[in-house]
Amino acid sequence: MGWRGFKFSLLLGIILLGCMEDEGSKKYTTIDVGVYIGSGVWDASVKATLSALRAQNFSIDTIDIAKIMQDKFYHCRVLLIPGGDPQVYSEALGTVGRDRIRRYVSNGYGFIGFGGGAALAGTDTGAFLGLGLLNTAARWPVSIIAPYPQWVMTSIILREPQHPVGLGFYPRFTALYRWGPDFPSPDASRTTILCEYVVSGTPAAVVSEYGAGSVVLFGFQPEFEEGSPRDSCEFGDDLSDPESEWQLIENAVKYCLSTFR
């Protein structure tokens, strides 16, 4: 092989290697869940979320704003945004970051939101620009349950016990509500109302799709184990919850992984 042929082969090899290592290549996806830890996040929610995922033996990475801006989160098959301030989330991500997440989900990856992370997924609210992964604005807080800045343990009904995310869970349970959203009037053709708040009768958790991806949103906080050290944080230690919602988290992650395209 001559020098020109060698250079051409070397260049071709570099190009092919770059394509193989592309962040968007699903062939090389190795992590189950990327947990957002950027601006606006509630630290206690992050700790509890990581504890739940580790207990369920999912592989985890943490994702900050820089990774989202650089598209360096495609190695995670699911992006999970814990509780926090959706307005700060939206401002920190900006137009570029929000577009990055929309494209990620549209390409077949999963999105899970708790509390403020779920509120971010809706359409524009007037207070902040949402991701638009759901065809309705997530409304928060639901003052009839607990006005801001209060929080409370609230009763929730599982409306779809046969859905993979709700399978095997309690038909009625108690969970922490802390300024999270409900999801009024979602598009019934592509959205399942998984749970509803007893007090308001409005959707508390929904499962939807965006492009080729799956979206699971919890308006309440399923990550906390109230009255137990199992979640590795002190928030809620003075509260009592007869059920653990960690099964819902496990079901949601497995559902998104099963629909990963």
Image (cartoon, rainbow, N blue to C red):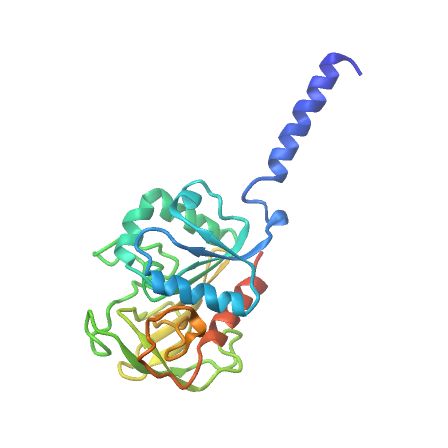
* Residue 167 in view in this figure: yes
Q: Is residue 33 above or below residue 182?
A: above
> Disc count in the image?
0
Q: Is residue 27 above or below residue 191?
A: above
Q: Is residue 45 left or right of residue 200?
A: right
Q: Please tell me which residue lies in front, 11 or 61.
A: 61
Q: Quadrant of residue 59?
A: bottom right
The residue located at (34%, 60%) in the rendering is 43
Q: Please tell me which residue lies in front, 257 or 206.
A: 257
The residue located at (29%, 63%) in the rendering is 137
Q: Residue furthest top?
A: 3
Which of the image's four quarters has the C terminus? bottom right
The residue located at (26%, 80%) in the rendering is 200
Q: Position of residue 231 (x, y in %)?
A: 43, 71
Q: Position of residue 196 (x, y in %)?
A: 35, 79
Q: Quadrant of residue 157?
A: bottom left
Q: Residue furthest right?
A: 1
Q: Position of residue 163 (x, y in %)?
A: 51, 76
Q: Quadrant of residue 226?
A: bottom left
* Residue 191 in view in this figure: no
The residue located at (38%, 46%) in the rendering is 65
Which of the image's four quarters has the N terminus? top right
Q: Position of residue 23 (x, y in %)?
A: 54, 43
Q: Is residue 261 left or right of residue 150?
A: right
Q: Is residue 45 above or below residue 226?
A: above
Q: Please tell me which residue lies in front, 39 or 157.
A: 39
